[in-house]
Image (spheres, rainbow, N blue to C red):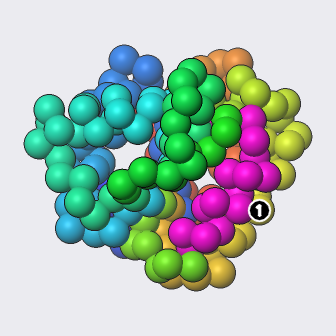
C-alpha cells in the first residue's frame, strides 16, 4: 500500500495495523513522505526512540516536527527541544489538541497521529471519539492531510469503527 497515493485521493485516513508490523509500517510510511513537511504526534514511543528508529532506517527527520506525549510521563524534559514539543501525557487531550492546533496553522503537508489506540489507555471511548472528530474537522478546514494510526485489537473495535466515520478512508493493513 502506497500511503502517498491514498493521501492524494483522501485528506484523512485511519490506518489499522497489526502490532507485529508496526515499526516496519511507520518507517515505510515516513520514507514515502520524504521531502514533505510532517508533524508527527507520538503517543506511543518517545521522541528519542522514534528518532533512533528513523535514523537506523535511514529516514531523514529534518522536515519532521514531533509532538511527544510520552516522554514527560517517564522523565523530566523541557516543554520543547530542537524539532520536538513535549505534551504532559497522552491523556492531556486538551493540551494535545491546542498544540496540534498551533501546528495546523503552520501549514504542514501531513500530520501523523500515532496512535488512536494509545489514547484509550488514558480515556474512555466517548472523549476519545469527540477528540478525534474535533481534530479531523480542524484538519479538513485546511490543506493538511492526516494519517491516524491504530493497532488492530479487538478491544478497540468500537473506537476504531466510530473513528472510521470521521475520516475519508480506513485502510486495514491486515487484509
Q: Nearer the viewer, residue 80 or 24?
A: 80
In the picture, measured across the screen, residue 35 lies left or right of residue 42, that is: left
Tell me, yes or no, if residue 120 can be seen here: yes
Query: Residue 127 sits in which quadrant?
Result: top right
The number of numbered discs placed on residues in the rendered structure image is 1
What kind of secondary structure does the magenta stretch mostly adopt? helix
Tell me, yes or no, if residue 157 can be seen here: no
The x and y percentages for residue 22 are: 37, 28
The x and y percentages for residue 133 are: 76, 58
- Helix, strand or loop status at disc 1: helix
The residue labelled by disc 1 is 134
Q: Would residue 65 be counted in the magenta stretch?
A: no
Q: Would residue 100 be counted in the magenta stretch?
A: yes
Q: Nearer the viewer, residue 172 or 61?
A: 61
Work out whether 122 lies above or below 83. Answer: above
The x and y percentages for residue 42 are: 50, 41
Say which residue appears at 74% left-offset and 35% top-offset. 91
Work out whether 35 lies above or below 40. Answer: below
Query: Badge 1, how many Cα within 10 Å: few under 14, some, many 20+?
Result: some
Q: Residue furthest right?
A: 126
Say which residue appears at 18% left-offset and 52% top-offset. 60
**What segment carries the magenta color?**
90-104
Q: Nearer the viewer, residue 46 or 149?
A: 46
Quarter of the image containing the C terminus? top left
In the picture, measured across the screen, residue 60 lies left or right of residue 137, that is: left
Q: Nearer the viewer, residue 165 or 24?
A: 24
Say which residue appears at 35% left-offset and 33% top-offset. 48
In the picture, measured across the screen, residue 157 lies left or right of residue 124, that is: left
Amino acid at each position: 500500500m502506497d500511503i502517498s497515493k491514498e493521501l492524494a485521493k483522501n485528506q484523512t485516513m485511519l490506518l489499522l495495523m497489526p502490532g507485529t508490523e508496526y515499526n516496519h509500517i511507520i518507517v515505510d510510511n515516513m520514507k514515502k513522505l520524504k521531502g514533505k513537511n510532517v508533524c508527527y504526534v507520538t503517543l506511543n514511543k518517545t521522541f528519542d526512540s522514534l528518532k533512533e528508529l528513523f535514523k537506523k532506517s535511514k529516514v531523514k527527520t529534518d522536515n519532521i516536527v514531533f509532538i511527544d506525549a510520552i516522554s514527560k510521563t517517564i522523565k523530566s524534559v523541557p516543554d520543547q527541544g530542537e524539532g520536538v514539543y513535549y505534551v504532559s501525557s497522552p491523556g492531556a487531550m486538551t493540551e494535545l489538541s491546542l498544540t496540534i492546533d498551533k501546528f495546523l496553522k503552520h501549514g504542514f503537508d501531513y500530520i501523523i497521529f500515532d496512535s488512536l489506540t494509545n489514547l484509550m489507555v488514558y480515556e474512555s471511548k466517548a472523549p476519545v471519539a469527540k477528540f478525534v472528530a474535533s481534530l479531523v474537522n480542524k484538519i479538513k478546514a485546511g490543506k493538511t492531510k492526516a494519517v491516524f494510526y491504530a493497532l488492530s485489537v479487538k478491544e478497540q473495535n468500537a473506537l476504531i469503527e466510530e473513528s472510521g466515520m470521521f475520516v475519508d478512508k480506513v485502510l486495514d493493513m491486515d487484509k
